[in-house]
Image: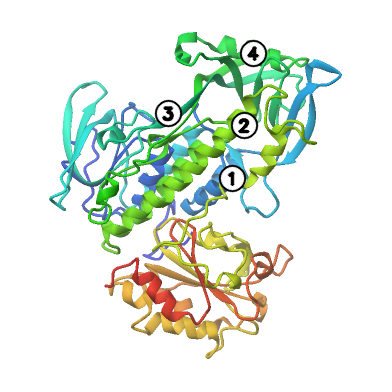
């Protein structure tokens, strides 16, 4: 994180200088009549989008939440490695690493063949495969995730905070105007319950859960099936002689059902997902009147011969597994997509629901809005045409379908009695086998976006075989040349809506004048066809839209920093200060060679174009000027 660019300021460096003309946030100040973006729901999807859009104080963003304040406990807890990478970009990845439980191993327990009424451990699997990510798989209270995102919004120049005790009652879209065409009726759910307020918005994003009023207003419907199986979840403080209670465990008993144990942050708390009753086809889980005592009793039976002495139930809930998805990720009918751009979107549980077994709900919801956030910012700040917003549905609906399909299979395998699953009869227990096969998916790393206007064709993929176009940028160790700082290259990027070009020098390239990398930097800085020149406004820093970073094959002590091209030493900000953090080289202490780890062509080098949401958009040769210019011209408007 860089700061002091605008001059020295003491105190918390995360607290940015407040932008002028902000909305009055006094306790009894009236709600606005117009906003650029209205977000419904302060869950993971809503708070992630709120934090992202708060980085643009010129965008007037409003977040409404029907509850009177933020949640304190319960709900989701799993943060996969891909989401941890995103947290790093928002600036709180290290904080989550410090506060959370790290999932290092997953253990598998099944009935003991010698004594089927008892369970025994039959295997362990490393939970995060080596070099799949630099970040761990963590477990932390969902409320804390909300708090961290809201802290980013509150400390931004926009000083954004949610509006609690308000919900979207209804909305309409006027397709004949471009001036705040979405009319939203908000309803108060607090001390003035029933009071309504009308807000006109340019865009609305429904992050308001499975019963989403935003989805309903645009004609969306969750469709799918239910497993007719009741499950309970409880966060507890308890004593047990079960030996693996501080490791993630999947436990299958012979006749009492299944349990999933997830240790939680703090060293004492842990979560249990407990299989309860099978439901009739037309029965809802609420009809069974299941309580925390039913869950505890079931868990005690499943854990036999081990004991469970519960001291405190921190939070609990009972639910029915269902797998449903809505095709309506935005308000534009299929027949109108060629002539009309979206104004209303849904994200998270508002458009896909599933079981919590694979730990994907919160993660996929946040990735939905991380995908949407930079696109909305591009459009609202005049950097891109509104047709860019069609790519949200195209990309995220595909991933939602993959999620529901994979989770459906996982829930079926998890709940099937021994001997009744398609994976039974193999050398490895079915749960362990399926878990290993899906490690990439559960880590959030299986996402691959198809070629589109924001994702290039794999013409030059051979130049960087380990940075696949359409997948997230896979970080690796480097050393920053200016200060010999060992770091992850991916951590140079922040969630600030900018594109990155990582330029990898070829053999013998030390950025001497005339080298391929030096020529690329000079072209980007000054040529009229350069996307930096074409898409950066005169009053902006030269890296305000496209941020060039260079990586060399030598070590830092052999680099001549003074010979770097000026684009890699840009003068920025109102004081005209030089940025020293654009140039990197190989790690010299054995943490890894990024060229070898990510399949970068050592002879030719290459450039890797990375989207604002950390996905690889293109791989091009260092002299691929025309292709680079054409790629950005299809996304960004010229200044």
In this rendering, position of residue 571 left or right of residue 35: right
How far apart are the two marked residues, 3 and 4, measured between alpha carbons? 28 Å
Mark 3 in CB contact with mark 2 (< 8 angstroms) = no
Location of the C terminus (image quadrant) = bottom left
Q: Which residue is mark 1?
A: 441
- C-alpha gap between disc 3 and disc 1: 28 Å
Give whichever of 338, 304 is nearer the camera.
Answer: 338
Tell me how far mark 1 sits from mark 2, CA to CA: 27 Å
- Tag 4 or tag 3, which sits nearer the N-term? 3
Residue 95 in the image: x percent, y percent? Answer: 55, 45
Q: Secondary structure at mark 1?
A: helix
In the displayed structure, does residue 37 sit left or right of residue 142?
left
Residue at the image position 79 percent from the left and 28 percent from the top: 121
Residue at (62%, 43%) from the top-left corner? 137
Q: Given contact means CB atoms under 8 Å apart, are the residues at marks 4 and 1 in contact?
A: no
* Residue 358 image position (x, y, % from top left): 58, 35
Residue designated by label 3: 71
Q: Which residue is mark 4?
A: 298
Q: Mark 2 = which residue? A: 266
Of badges 4 and 1, the one in the foreground is 1
Identify the mark nearer the N-term, 1 or 2.
2
Q: Nearer the viewer, mark 3 or mark 4?
A: 4
- Name the quadrant containing residue 591: bottom right
Note whether 267 is above or below 443 in the view shown: above
Q: Residue at x 51, y 32 (%)?
A: 76
Residue with the most extreme bottom position: 514
């Amino acid at each position: 994180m860089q700061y002091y660019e605008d001059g020295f300021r003491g105190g918390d460096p995360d607290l940015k200088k407040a932008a002028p003309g902000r909305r009055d946030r006094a306790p009894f100040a009236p709600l606005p009549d117009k906003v650029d973006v209205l977000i419904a729901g302060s869950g993971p999807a809503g708070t992630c989008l709120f934090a992202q859009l708060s980085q643009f104080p010129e965008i007037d963003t409003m977040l409404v939440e029907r509850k009177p304040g933020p949640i304190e406990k319960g709900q989701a807890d799993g943060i996969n490695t891909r989401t941890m990478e995103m947290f790093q970009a928002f600036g709180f990845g290290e904080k989550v690493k410090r506060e959370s439980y790290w999932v290092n191993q997953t253990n598998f327990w099944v009935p003991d063949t010698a004594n089927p009424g008892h369970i025994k451990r039959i295997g362990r699997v490393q939970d995060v495969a080596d070099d799949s990510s630099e970040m761990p798989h963590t477990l932390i209270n969902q409320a804390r995730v909300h708090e961290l995102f809201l802290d980013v919004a509150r400390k931004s120049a926009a000083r954004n905070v949610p509006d609690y005790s308000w919900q979207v009652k209804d909305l309409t879209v006027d397709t004949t105007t471009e001036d705040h065409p979405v009319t939203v009726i908000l309803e108060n759910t607090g001390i003035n319950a029933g009071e309504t307020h009308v807000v006109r918005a340019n865009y609305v994003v429904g992050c308001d859960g499975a019963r989403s009023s935003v989805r309903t207003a645009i004609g969306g419907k969750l469709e799918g099936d239910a497993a007719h199986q009741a499950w309970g979840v409880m966060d507890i403080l308890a004593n047990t002689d079960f030996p693996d209670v501080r490791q993630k465990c999947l436990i299958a008993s012979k006749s009492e059902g299944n349990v999933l144990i997830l240790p939680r942050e703090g060293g004492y708390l842990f979560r249990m997902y407990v299989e309860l009753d099978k439901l009739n086809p037309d029965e809802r889980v609420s009809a069974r009147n299941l309580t925390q005592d039913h869950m505890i009793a079931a868990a005690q039976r499943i854990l036999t011969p081990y004991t469970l002495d519960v001291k405190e139930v921190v939070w609990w809930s009972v639910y029915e597994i269902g797998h449903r998805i809505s095709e309506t990720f935005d308000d534009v009918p299929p027949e109108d997509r060629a002539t009309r751009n979206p104004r209303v979107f849904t994200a998270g549980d508002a458009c896909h629901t599933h079981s919590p077994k694979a730990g994907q709900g919160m993660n996929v919801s946040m990735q939905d809005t991380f995908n949407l956030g930079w696109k909305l910012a591009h459009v609202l700040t005049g950097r891109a045409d509104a047709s860019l917003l069609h790519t949200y549905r195209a990309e995220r609906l595909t991933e939602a379908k993959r999620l529901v399909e994979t989770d459906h299979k996982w829930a079926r395998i998890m709940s099937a009695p021994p001997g009744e699953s398609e994976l039974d009869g193999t050398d490895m227990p079915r749960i362990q086998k399926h878990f290993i096969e899906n490690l990439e998916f559960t880590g959030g790393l299986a996402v691959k976006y198809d070629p589109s206007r924001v994702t290039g064709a794999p013409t030059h993929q051979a130049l960087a075989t380990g940075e696949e176009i359409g997948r997230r940028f896979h970080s690796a160790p480097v050393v920053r040349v200016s200060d010999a700082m060992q770091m992850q290259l991916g951590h140079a990027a922040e969630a600030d809506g900018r594109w990155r070009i990582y330029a990898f020098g070829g053999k013998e390239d030390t950025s001497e004048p005339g080298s391929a990398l030096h020529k690329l930097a000079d072209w980007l800085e000054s040529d009229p066809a350069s996307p930096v020149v074409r898409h950066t406004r005169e009053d902006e820093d030269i890296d305000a839209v496209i941020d060039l970073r260079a990586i060399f094959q030598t070590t830092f002590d052999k680099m001549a920093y003074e010979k770097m091209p000026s684009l890699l030493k840009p003068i920025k900000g109102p004081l005209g200060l030089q940025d020293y953090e654009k140039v990197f080289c190989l790690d010299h202490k054995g943490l890894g060679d990024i060229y070898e780890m990510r399949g970068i062509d050592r002879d030719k080098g290459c450039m890797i174009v990375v989207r604002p949401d950390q996905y690889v958009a293109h791989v091009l040769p260092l002299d691929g000027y025309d292709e680079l210019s054409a790629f950005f011209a299809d996304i960004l408007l010229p200044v």
